[in-house]
Amino acid sequence: MRLLSLLVTVSLTLAVAYYIYTPLPDAIQQPWKLMMLDAYFRTAIHVATLKQWLGFGHYITSIRQSTHGFEGIMKGLISESSPGPVPGVKVSDITFAGIPVRVYEPPAGGEGHLRRGLVYFHGGGWALGTTKKGTYDTINRMVSDELNTVVVSVEYRLYPEVHFPVPYLDCLAAAKHFLSPEVLAKYAIDPERVAVAGDSSGGNLAAAVAQEVSVDDSMSVKFSVQALIYPVLQALDFNTPSYVENQYMPMLSRSFMIQFWVQYLNADLSLVPQFAVNNHSTLQHSAITPELRSRLDWNVLLPQKYKKNHKPLIVEKGSHGVLKKVPGLLDVRAAPLLAGPEVLAKCPRAYILTCEYDVLRDDGLMYARRLQDAGVTVTIAHYEDGFHGCFSLISWPLEFDVGKRALRGYLSWLQNNL
C-alpha cells in the first residue's frame, strides 16, 4: 500500500512538473516564477474553456473572475509587505463623454502651477483588464505622484460585450474630452504637456488615438508625446521573426494573440489556424497593395539582428473573401502600423518599449522605424531579458527585476520628455 501511495505521489508530482515546465531562454531571470505564473493563467484558460463548453457562460467572463480572484490574493499578500496607496493622490471614478474613467490627481500643484496630463489605456487583449485593480492602479498612482501628473485611466468596453471599433471609439471620446481646453483648465494641466500611453492592446489603442488626434484639425490641443508599451499594431503577418521565435513564450503565445485579434475584429474563431499561416493576407487579395504591404515589411523595417535567418511567409492563395468578412484587418484604427506616412509625420514624439522574448517585439520595432522615417523623434527602450507582461510584474511576490527596470525607464522618459 505504501509503495502504491509513493508511486501515485511521484506520478502526480511528475505530471504537475511537466505541466508547469516550459523551456525558457537563459536570459530570463527567475524562470520558475514565470513558469508558475504562466501555468496559473493557462489553467484559468483551460477551466474557463471547459465551463463554456458545459454551458456555464462565456470563457472570457470566467477568466475575468479567475484573474480578479488572483488579484485579490496578491493584494492581500502585497499589503503585508509594502505600504498602501500613494498618500496624497486623489482618486475619482467619473465619466468623460459618457466613458468611465479613473482620474488620479497629484498632491502638488494648484493655482499658478500647471501640471502634466496623461491618458492611459490598459492592456488585456481588448477583453481583460481594468483600470481599478492591480498593477495599473499602482503604476498610475506612481506616475501621478512622482511626475506631478493628472492621469486619466480609461475603462473602455471589452469583448465579448463589444467588438471593434467600440473600444477604440470609447478611448477616442475620453481622450478628446480630456484634451478640451475647459477640462485641462479645470485640472490645471499645461496643454503643451499631455501624453497618451498604453500597454499591449492598450498600446494599440494609444497609437490609434494618437494618430486620429494628430490629424484632427478641429482640436486645438494635441498630445505632446506617446508612450507605447509592447504595443500590438498589425494583424496581417503572424510570422514575423518575433512571432515565430516566441510563439510558445509566456505570457502571450502566438495562438492566443491571434485569438485576441479574431475576437476583437468580430470574426469566427475557426479562422485562427488560417491567420497563423498568413492565409488571410495572401497575394490574391488585391486590397492589400504592394504599397500597403511595405508598411509592415519586416524584411526592410527590422535591423538585421532581429531578422536573423528568417524568411517572409507570403502566401499566393489562401482564405477566399476573408477581407470582406473581416474588414477591420485593413482599418488603421485597428492596425496603426498600416497608417500612411502623411499621418505618421503628424504624430507626437514617441517612446516605444519592446521585449526580446515577446511575439509583439517586431510590431513595436517596425512602428518605431516607420515613425522615424516620417520624421518623428522616437526613443526605443528594448529589454534583452524582457517578456510580454513584465511591465506589470513589479510587486512582491510577482516582481521581476526587468519589470521594475521597465517601469523606471518609462517614468524617467516621461519625466524628461513630457
Image (cartoon, rainbow, N blue to C red):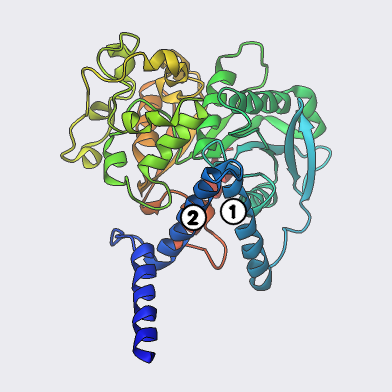
Left or right of residue 166: residue 276: left
Where residue 273 sits in the image (x, y, percent)? 33, 33
Q: Residue at x 73, y 25 (%)?
A: 177
Circle 1 crowding by C-alpha within 10 Å: few under 14, some 14–19, many from 20: some
Name, please, the residue furthest toward the bottom: 2
Q: Amino acid at mark 1?
A: Thr
Mark 1 and mark 2: Cα distance apart in space: 8 Å
Q: Quadrant of the C terminus?
A: top right
Q: Which mark is residue 348?
A: none
Q: Quadrant of residue 151?
A: top right
Would residue 34 be seen by someone viewing this image from the given angle?
yes
Q: Quadrant of residue 341?
A: top left
Q: Secondary structure at mark 1?
A: helix
Q: Secondary structure at mark 2?
A: helix
Q: Nearer the viewer, residue 329 or 202?
A: 329
Q: Nearer the viewer, residue 211 or 199?
A: 199
Q: Quadrant of the N terminus?
A: bottom left
Circle 2 crowding by C-alpha within 10 Å: few under 14, some 14–19, many from 20: some
Q: Which mark is residue 41?
A: 2
Name, please, the residue furthest toward the left: 309
Where residue 344 sits in the image (x, y, percent)? 45, 20
Q: Residue at x 66, y 21 (%)?
A: 221
Q: Nearer the viewer, residue 108 or 39?
A: 39
In this view, 62 is above or below 318: below
Q: Amino acid at mark 2?
A: Phe
Where residue 2 sits in the image (x, y, percent)? 38, 91
In this view, 352 is above or below 166: below
Circles 1 and 2, Cβ within 8 Å, touching? The answer is yes
Left or right of residue 303: residue 345: right
- The residue at which mark 1 appears reads as 67
Left or right of residue 380: residue 154: right
